[in-house]
Every structure is written in structure tokens, then in C-alpha cells.
Image (cartoon, rainbow, N blue to C red):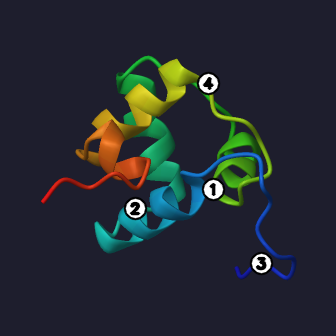
Amino acid sequence: MHRNEPPGDKNIIGSKVVATRKAKRVKQKDFLARLQTFGLDISPTSLSRLEGQYRLVQDYELVAIAKALEVSVQELLGEQQS
């Protein structure tokens, strides 16, 4: 499923979440289950809106997403360290 509309402007991590999740070959459904193991229970719609940058991301969500993707919070924020 491809988006017809341009990305939103509610967060800066959505596109990075999608890219990282797809690079790791993790389906949305499996990612949602993984998020639950880190204490974050969000709906598929909410995840889609987050990934499309159409919803705000809470700080605790950012931490759980980073853990679930096995990346740093800094990496999700685009502050990769060299």
C-alpha cells in the first residue's frame, strides 16, 4: 500500500521508522506486537499515522520505538553519531 498524499509535519521520526522497519523486514503487524513487549500499545491506524508523520509522538513512545527497532533514539531523530 502506497501513500497518495505527501508526508505530514507532526513528527520527524516517521519516515525513519518506516525505512528502518522495512530494512529489517518487519511487517507493521509484527512491529505492533514488538512495541507491546516494550509497553507501548498503539493501534495499527495510530502507527500508520505516526509513520506518515500525521500524528505527534510522545517521548515514551520514541523510547519504545527505538528499543523495538534496536536503534538509538538519536538515530531516529537523525542525529547519527560517526
Residue type at the position of mark 4: Gln
Separation of residues labelled 1 and 2 (CA atoms): 10 Å
Mark 3 neighbour class, 10 Å CA radius: few under 14, some 14 to 19, many 20 or more:
few
Q: Which mark is residue 58?
A: 4
Separation of residues labelled 2 and 3 (CA atoms): 16 Å
Answer with mark 1 or mark 3, whichever residue precedes in sequence: 3
Q: Position of residue 55 (x, y in %)?
A: 77, 42
Q: Are marks 3 and 4 in contact (CB under 8 Å)?
A: no
* Residue behind mark 1: 51
* Residue behind mark 3: 3
Residue type at the position of mark 3: Arg
Residue 7 occupies quadrant: bottom right
Q: Are marks 1 and 2 in contact (CB under 8 Å)?
A: yes
User: What secondary structure is found at the residue carrying circle 4?
Assistant: loop
* Residue behind mark 2: 21
Answer with mark 3 or mark 4, whichever residue precedes in sequence: 3
Q: Nearer the viewer, residue 36 or 72?
A: 72
Mark 2 neighbour class, 10 Å CA radius: few under 14, some 14 to 19, many 20 or more:
some
Disc nearest the viewer among 4 and 1: 4
